[in-house]
Image: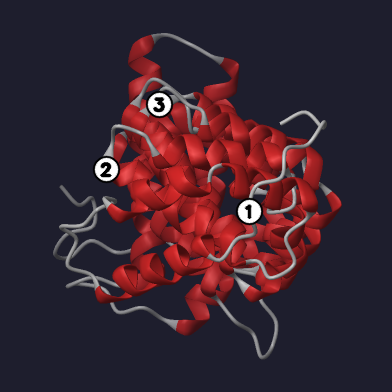
């Protein structure tokens, strides 16, 4: 139920921010449950007021002057990091409205500037708090929604990728809570696909650490994690911006062996996604010796396997790719035994 119904006057932006900040400060001091509930209700009311200031509702029209005033109050008071730190104590509606307020402020433009993006760049604790929010199921989804809003802005993605906290995502996407794990993976995908040049630089610089962690996801006992990770890997490798990363990845024998293993996975979805990574190894016109050696050694088995691979799939592109792959494998040179380990 809205606190600001018919005839209710909306408080001024400076009042909304001040009262919210005072209420959060009272939160920090602690107190009995009755007081805590009263404070929570006060914060919920104020955040709803902020949302109405920005978006308007049936009884209140948004006013540009008030929007600017609210944004400036947010910046000068440092209310945002404070709210995020204490978000777990907020009521459900307050969390939802805070996400809406955050989204509006983040999209706000002043000429060619994005004031909230600039503010977050100077207050990186905001991004750290959002990432670490995945450790608490009560706020994980709200933090994820705000992080994906941040992912639209390259300067913010750059900060997240450079932070030690980024590597925590490899733990979050494997969490037992399915909803939290799926949300975390959605955020990772946004971070790794929105700003291609930035991500390519990050992957080149952190290639070993990234793919060591990523291989853990490809070997995950969790079906969803494995399937999503394979699908995203295919997208990353086939993106032109990641050509150098793709070239390095498909030159490593351990990666080829893993894809050949996943091709035979009992899950049709996983084997299908593995196919889209495996095809990059085969289609490479400059295969390194060890890669060529393994493919040649398994030539007959691969041809027999692919001839019966997803034959019921009505997908012209897939069928064309499979036919191309079969041709490429059949044209491989005859296997020559090698003394090197395979």
Tell me the tag on residue 268.
2
Residue 80 image point, x, y percent: 60, 48
Q: Nearer the viewer, residue 237 or 172?
A: 237
Q: Earlier in the sequence, mark 2 or mark 1?
A: 2
Relative to the observer, which residue lies in front, 267 or 118? 267
Residue ID for mark 1: 334
Q: Would residue 24 be found to the left or right of residue 334 on screen?
A: left
Left or right for 24, reference 120 = left
Mark 1 closeness class: few <14, some 14–19, many ≥20 residues within 10 Å: few
Q: Is residue 45 visible?
A: no
**Label 2 crowding class (10 Å Cα cut-off): few <14, some 14-19, many 20+?**
few
Q: What is the number of the mark on residue 228?
A: none
Disc marking residue 137:
3
In the rendered structure, are the residues bearing label 2 and label 1 in contact, judged by CB atoms less than 8 Å apart? no
Horizontal and vertical percent for residue 163?
Answer: 77, 43
Q: Nearer the viewer, residue 222 or 15?
A: 222
How far is mark 3 from mark 2, CA to CA?
Answer: 31 Å
The Cα–Cα distance between marks 2 and 1, rounded to whole angstroms, is 30 Å
Residue 229 seen anywhere in this rendered image of the structure = yes
Estimate the x, y position of residue 82 in percent, counting from the top left.
61, 39
Going from N to C along the chain, the mark reached first, 3 or 1, is: 3
Residue 48 sits above or below residue 171 on the image: below
Q: Earlier in the sequence, mark 3 or mark 2?
A: 3
**C-alpha gap between disc 3 and disc 1:** 55 Å
């Amino acid at each position: 139920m809205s606190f600001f119904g018919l005839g209710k006057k909306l408080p001024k932006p400076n009042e909304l921010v001040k009262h919210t900040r005072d209420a959060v400060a009272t939160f920090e001091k602690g107190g009995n449950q009755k007081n805590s509930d009263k404070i929570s209700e006060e914060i919920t009311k104020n955040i709803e007021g902020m949302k109405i200031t920005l978006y308007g509702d049936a009884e209140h029209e948004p006013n540009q002057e008030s929007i600017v005033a609210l944004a400036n109050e947010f910046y000068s008071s440092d209310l945002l990091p404070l709210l995020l730190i204490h978000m777990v104590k907020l009521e459900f509606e307050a969390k939802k409205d805070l996400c809406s307020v955050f989204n509006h402020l983040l999209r706000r433009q002043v000429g060619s500037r994005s004031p909230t993006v600039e503010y977050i760049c100077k207050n990186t604790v905001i991004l750290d708090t959002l990432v670490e929010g995945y450790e608490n199921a009560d706020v994980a989804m709200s933090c994820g929604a705000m992080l994906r809003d941040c992912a639209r802005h390259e300067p913010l993605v750059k900060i997240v990728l450079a932070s030690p906290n980024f590597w925590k995502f490899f733990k979050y996407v494997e969490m037992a809570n399915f909803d939290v794990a799926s949300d975390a993976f959605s955020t990772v995908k946004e971070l790794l696909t929105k700003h291609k040049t930035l991500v390519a630089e990050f992957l080149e610089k952190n290639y070993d650490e990234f793919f060591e962690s990523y291989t853990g996801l490809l070997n995950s006992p969790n079906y969803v994690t494995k399937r999503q990770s394979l699908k995203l890997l295919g997208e990353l490798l086939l993106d032109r911006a990641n050509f150098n990363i793709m070239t390095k990845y498909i030159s490593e024998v351990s990666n080829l062996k893993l894809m050949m293993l996943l091709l035979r996975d009992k899950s049709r979805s996983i084997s299908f996604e593995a196919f889209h990574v495996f095809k990059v190894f085969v289609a490479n016109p400059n295969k390194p010796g060890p890669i060529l050696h393994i493919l040649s050694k398994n030539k007959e088995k691969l041809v027999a396997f692919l001839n019966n691979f997803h034959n019921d799939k009505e997908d012209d592109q897939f069928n064309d790719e499979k036919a191309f792959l079969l041709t490429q494998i059949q044209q491989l040179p005859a296997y020559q035994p090698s003394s090197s380990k395979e």
